[in-house]
Amino acid sequence: LGTQCGKLWLTVSSLWRPIAASDKVIDAELEVNWELDCPPNVPPPDTIKLFTADPAH
């Protein structure tokens, strides 16, 4: 595993909304935000990933 320092927030919105100039709607949205608080001697991670299942299994 890589460096693990910081916090991640995943916001799920289930409020549907129409797509402008289209007859389609967005029925759910995901928003990912993060804050890194690595100590000075630890490099920040290269990537932040979102998985649909536990990647360790």
Image (tube, rainbow, N blue to C red):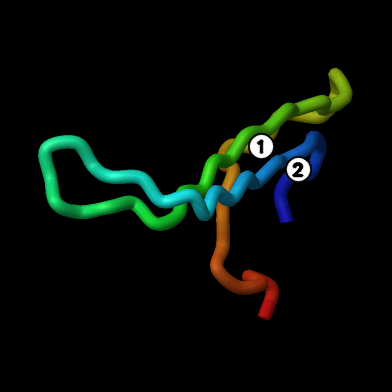
Going by the numbered disc 2, the residue's amino acid type is Thr
**Which residue is labeled 2 in the image?**
3
Relative vertical location of residue 15 with respect to residue 41 in this rendering, above or below: below
Query: Residue 7 occupies which quadrant of the picture?
Result: top right
25 vs 48, nearest the viewer: 25
46 vs 22, nearest the viewer: 22
Q: Position of residue 8 (x, y in %)?
A: 72, 41
**Which residue is labeled 1 in the image?**
45
**Residue displayed at 54% across by 48% down:** 13
Residue 2 relative to residue 32: left or right: right
Going by the numbered disc 1, the residue's amino acid type is Pro
Residue 49 relative to residue 22: left or right: right
Q: Are marks 1 and 2 in contact (CB under 8 Å)?
A: yes
Query: Residue 28 occupies which quadrant of the picture?
Result: bottom left
Q: Position of residue 49 (x, y in %)?
A: 57, 50
32 vs 2, nearest the viewer: 32
